[in-house]
Amino acid sequence: MARAVTTQHKTIATLAAWIVALLIFFPILYTIITSFKSEQEAIQGFNLIPSGTFESYSEVQQQSGYFKFFFNSVLLSVGSTILALIVAIPAAWSMAFSPTRRTKDILMWMLSTKMMPAVAVLFPIYLIFRDSGLLDSRIGLMVMLMLINLPIVVWMLYTYFREIPGEILEAARMDGASLWNEIIYVLTPMAVPGIASTMLLNIILAWNEAFWTIRLTTTNAAPLTAFISSFSSPQGLFWAKLSAASTLAIAPILIMGWFSQKQLVRGLTFGAVK
Amino acid sequence: MKLRTLTLGLLSASALAFAAHAESITIATVNNGDMVRMQKLTDDFTKANPDIQLNWVTLEENVLRERVTTDIATKGGQYDVMTIGTYEVPIWAKQNWLLPLDKLGDDYDTKDIIPAIAGGLSVDGKLYAAPFYGESSFVMYRKDLMEKAGLKMPDAPTWDFIKQAADKMTDRANGVNGVCLRGKAGWGENMAFLTAMSNSFGARWFDENWKPQFDQPEWKNTLQFYVDLMKADGPEGASSNGFNENLALFQQGKCGMWIDATVAASFVSDPKNSTVADKVGYALAPDNGLGKRGNWLWAWSLAIPAGTQKADAAEKFVSWATSKHYAELVASKEGWANVPPGTRSSLYANPEYQKAAPFAKMTLDSINAADPTHPTVKPVPYVGVQFVAIPEFQGLGTTVGQLFSAALAGQSSVDDALKQAQDAATAAMTEGGYIK
């Protein structure tokens, strides 16, 4: 009897998980389906079976070069993530292993910067970028994306580092390891799952960031978010083309997420059951 | 061998020097058919101007508006040519944010620009943006359904006729709505239509002292007529329909009439995309016998920001893109029907264009019927037919648009929507220092 209940519970839980997953994934799935429709089909209401035309993909490719935007997206998301890790690993180390009375407040303050709408600082940031000659530059945008995601990166790493016993680091110090050696050779290898998942999440966040990447770029540094934005039309049908552009833009990150999901889930649930 | 190496070296060096000398200009634009076509035809420009390279930035309309506003207000210098509309031009020109276009060339023929359009893009007699394509609004209707209803559309209908025709054409069983109108909230969406419509009902946004006028009977008549008409004869979910949604409905044969941009004529009469291409008739926007019609005036135009370092190259490009030569270039490559409409009188005098575009005369008549400097029956202190050319209008227009969209959706009454609109407009005008 007990086994029957367990099986029933399992079935219900599995079914619920599938329904939730489908609900979350459905908008993406419908975007992909719409990208294989003609413009007329796309606007004719809900329909899950497309005619299977590649017309939109060919028009999107003709209208603007995908690869230039793709290259910028890769460079910006990976570059900003590396920069963020370089700053965040030492910061999280000091907060986790050498906390002060103010550590909690600093962590909260860092997180509070995420609570302000980005548009509130659009003009100051735009002026700083203009005066530093950083408008439409990859370096400038990389630094911007790093700063946006830094609070999350520090918080995640801080949580992972707290799970590592301080005694191990002390032992390394006793053996004469310098501070950098301690961070690079002892702490980092032990926190690899945490760092990897932080890295993956940060790449996804940077890849999808649309506010600053559209507003601080024109042509040279414009990533895939700007590519998608260019397909919305004030007068004329555009849903199929917009869906094709969106599918092309999300495909790389979707594939990366699929292959690294084990690592991502492992990192995100690291220490959760302790 | 040495000589060959030297020659090759010199050639490469001169090529590099030339490439370094080439000036690149950045053009910000929206994604619509005419703009996309222009991007494909720019070889003609770069061949004639090999020292100028063109970089394109295409953005969604609202994002473009925000991006170019930020850039021009901060003198960011990111763009050398901007695509802006008749709303921005007078405001930005007065702020000295735009360069006057006085070097468009001897053969440009500025006088050929349709006077109503040129007026909307000029300040103190100086042209600050060159129109790329212009539009008004008019009635597009199904000739077959009109005939079935036993009616004949006059060239210049009244609102009462529109109501009568819509009632007769509505056939819910066959999915035909008598009339399709904009309902989606936004200053450039439902408020473009409703502001233009209100002009023909004798309404105005503000009196001569900038006092909002939503508490006056003219606005009540406008909004009540619109809501009643749409409830009786409009499509389901009309409060979320904008230009594109109504275009799709009309092309699928689900609208008896559609009152919207004249530029839509080329879409609804295109047999590739429209199931009713051979059944469409055109008429002027309706009136109420008060001397003003419910049509608007808009032109997507090319302007040069004051912060650019490449004004000469930018003006050369603007001159090319809005010239008679460009119209001929489009005609030779893609046919006369695809020439950007609504900017030059000479295009409408061209028999080949008249033949290719059966809606040409009605488009020109509609554009000529709009007067941005005297848009309303009663006097007003502002310029603009379907907008008020003040910086506060974008925000206020959208707020009022949301209130009117809610009235159409049945979430509030016409009286409540008008009262809230009056309060919002009074607050915005007081805050802006227009009324004390």
Image (cartoon, rainbow, N blue to C red):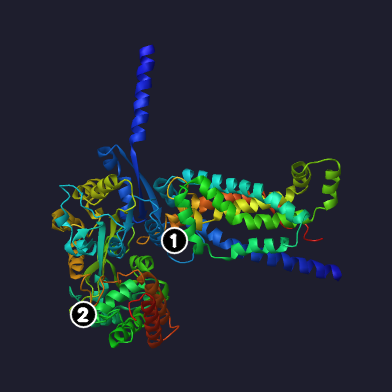
Q: CA separation, marks 2 and 1?
A: 42 Å
Label 2–label 1 contact, CB within 8 A: no
> Residue B122 is drawn in which quadrant?
bottom left
Q: Residue at x 13, y 55 (%)?
A: B351
Examine the rendered structure and indicate whether residue B46 appears above or below residue B386: above
Q: Residue at x 28, y 44 (%)?
A: B313
Name the quarter where the C terminus of chain B is drawn.
bottom left
Residue B232 appears in the picture as rendered: yes
Chain ID, mark 1:
A
Chain ID, mark 2:
B
What element does badge 2 sit on? loop
Q: Position of residue B381 (x, y in %)?
A: 25, 76
Q: Residue at x 55, y 59 (%)?
A: A28
Amino acid type of the residue that numbered disc 2 sits on in the rendered structure? Val
The residue at which mark 1 appears reads as A42
Examine the rendered structure and indicate whether residue B228 appears above or below residue A249: below
Q: Is residue A92 left or right of residue B131?
A: right
Residue B23: mark = none
Query: Which tag is nearer the camera, tag 2 or tag 1?
Result: 2
Q: Position of residue B223 (x, y in %)?
A: 33, 82
Q: Position of residue A183 (x, y in %)?
A: 75, 45
Name the quarter where the N terminus of chain B is drawn.
top left
On the same chain, marks 2 and 1? The answer is: no
Pick the front one: B133 or B131: B131
Q: Is residue A123 left or right of residue A270?
A: left
The residue at which mark 2 appears reads as B377
Q: Is residue B434 left or right of residue A154?
A: left
Amino acid type of the residue that numbered disc 1 sits on in the rendered structure? Ala
